Amino acid sequence: MTQTSYTVHSSAIVDDGAQIGEGSRIWHFAHVCSGAQIGKGVSLGQNVFVGNKVIIGDKCKIQNNVSVYDNVFLEEGVFCGPSMVFTNVYNPRSLIERKSEYRDTLIKRGATLGANCTIVCGVTVGEFAFVGAGAVINKDVKPYALMVGVPARQVGWMSAYGEQIPLPVTGTGEYTCPHTGQHYRLNDHTLECSSK
């Protein structure tokens, strides 16, 4: 392991110019390209690839076998489960160059992307949303939404703490998290969170 303000395994490749925050850890066989911007306290698991036009916020955890391609942006505290998939071209062909057609993908603060899920490029996944294992996201996801299936559909709500909230997908209702004291209010299709 190489120790600077961050830790890099000897088998990993970090290209010159990559910006990596203090306390981050880059594990076996990972590759970070020169234009990448990685925050503080980030963990990149085995065989992770990070492209040039990528921003990864503080305290993100990217598990084994994940490629974070150009035009993917992760805010603080995003969890990427093992072997989940990002894309950056909507209609790829090997015989046609489409680098000018990359679509931005934004994963907002605290969201969880479960193992083997796929995030089709051009979407925004809202704060603290939870994408279940194997789901395929092809549309924007609301904050706190619990998404499952292929294509994914919303089946509930998740707290910032990471537990399912006992409220319907639509309607009205209120819930207080027993772990954090955060208060959630459902109004039709929108869940809002506030601290009491």
Image (cartoon, grey):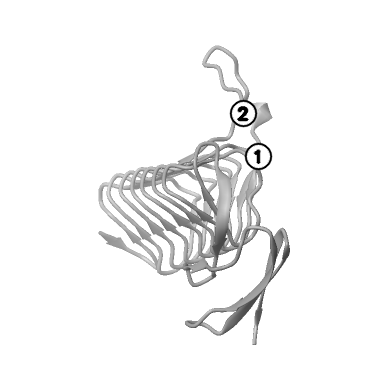
Q: Which residue is mark 1?
A: 122
Q: Residues within 10 Å of mark 1 (few under 14, many from 20)?
A: some
Quick check: 23 left or right of 166? Answer: left
On the rendered image, what quadrant is the N terminus found in? Answer: bottom left
Question: How many neighbours does mark 2 have within 10 angstroms: few (below 14), some (14-19), or many (20 or more)?
Answer: few
Against 143, is 12 above or below? above
Q: Position of residue 91 (x, y in %)?
A: 61, 23
Horizontal and vertical percent for residue 74?
56, 54
Please tell me in which quadrant of the rendered image residue 194 appears.
Answer: bottom right
Which residue is rendered at x = 60% and y = 29% of the image? 89
Residue at 34%, 52% in the rendered image: 45
Please name the amino acid that badge 2 sits on. Tyr
What secondary structure is found at the residue carrying circle 2?
loop
- Residue occupying the far right of the picture: 188
Nearest to N terminus: mark 1 or mark 2: 2
Rendered position, 185 above or below 81: below
**Element marked by disc 1:** loop
Task: Give the residue at x 62% y 80%.
Answer: 183
Q: Is disc 1 in contact with disc 2, using a CB cutoff of under 8 Å?
A: yes
Q: Quadrant of residue 7?
A: bottom left
Q: Which residue is mark 2?
A: 90
Q: Quadrant of the C terminus?
A: bottom right
Q: CA distance from mark 1 to mark 2?
A: 8 Å
Between 50 and 175, the residue placed more toward the observer is 175
